[in-house]
Image (cartoon, rainbow, N blue to C red):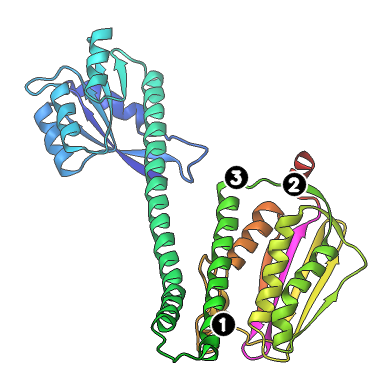
Amino acid sequence: MEKLKLLIVDDEQPMREGVMRALRKYTVSLPYAEEDYGFDFSEAGTGEEALDVIDRTPPDILLLDYKLPGIKGLDVLDHIIQRQLDILTVMITAYASLETAVSATRYGAYDFLAKPFTPEELRTAVHKAVKHLILTRQARKFTEEKRRVRFQFISVLAHELKSPLSAVEGYLRIMQTRSAGNELGAYDEMVRRSVTRLEGMRKMIMDILDLTRIESGQKTREMAEVDLRDVARVAIETAQPPAQERGISIELDSPESIFMVADRGELEIILNNLASNAVKYNRDHGKVTLALSADDETVTIACTDTGIGMSEEETVQLFKEFGRIKNEKTRHILGSGLGLSTLKKLATEYYGGGVKVESKPGEGTTFTVTLQRRPAGSEAKA
């Protein structure tokens, strides 16, 4: 149980003791919070004492008497506002009136509790205050986390794009100044490398668009009966040109047809990523096998290659955004580091399935993706 600091400020000792008795064993349960909330109490009989406690150990919740000897309750409230302290204040007073309530809320009080009040009325006010406090803090934490992730994403994206842009710019400047001579053939390799870099950047941009559409919930889905084997066949055809250049064979091991309810474009993202990665990280004259199977509830896609493989530590990084394995064998292989992250989000969040990977360095890798044949809510989207 998490404890919130609660400060009771009232010039009547019996009132302070009564509040503590009413709340000592009271806990607040919230459906969106992992723990219940209890209270650690502190008390003050004057505004001056309250300011001393607030400055030393600021409470989470303040029960503040409106009328105090010396410094008044509104003065204490003004001190909190001026210092921009994260304290939620409930004003308590025997002088209950609309004017008093308006004055207190204008100064920053969250709620207003009129004396005399029952223990149940006190608990209700405190429960409402705790709920507001936790929601506000969670919203603030979410906003800060969102800002941090956005900054991190942009920083990594800028880093990933800077290298290919610099390479293309360098080649273009060599061509511009004719540094390699006047023979056009001298620039063929530079053109080829520039095109490869541009294709990599285009792939990264498309991967980012896929990922942001999925995460934003704005992706338009067209759910229908789809033959997974047909989608796999097209993915293999797409991967054939780079595979043939390196003598890599691609085989499809599948029943005649495997039908499931899905968005065809989403299945294409999954299968294209599996096939292209299996070719990209394979050895020359290697082999890729794309195996499909199904039961009544799920379909399984297993993509096996005879490539460079990975250690167990390296596989942990695979499904992170921009998570690429960088070592001596992969440093010349271009990629966005977003494809597998997008694949996993689709499999887990859209199709109630999962992804696992088995790999041995120097021997190869197998990715296994499971998908529900009729994912939750697919009937409504069909």
Q: Residues within 10 Å of mark 1 (few under 14, many from 20)?
A: few
Q: Amino acid at mark 3?
A: Gln
Q: Quadrant of residue 54?
A: top left
Q: Amino acid at mark 1?
A: Arg
Identify residue for label 1. Answer: 192
Disc 2 target residue? 222
Gap between marks 2 and 3 measured at Cα: 13 Å
Q: Which of the two discs, 1 and 3, labels the residue nearer the N terminus?
A: 1
Task: State the image coordinates of residue 47 (x, y, percent, origin top left).
Answer: 12, 27
**Residue 27 vs residue 238: left or right?**
left
Residue 139 numbered mark, or none: none
The quadrant of the rendering that contains the C terminus is top right
Mark 1 or 3: in front is 1
Please name the residue shown 59% across and 46% down the image.
217
Helix, strand or loop at mark 3: loop
User: Circle 3 sits on which residue?
Assistant: 218
Horizontal side of residue 89 vs 78, given as left or right: right
Mark 1 or 2: in front is 1
Residue at image x 61%, y 88%? 361
Main SS class of the magenta portion in the image: strand
- Type of residue at label 2? Glu
The image quarter in which residue 16 lies: top left
The magenta region covers: 359-373
**Where's residue 315, x and y in %?**
58, 76
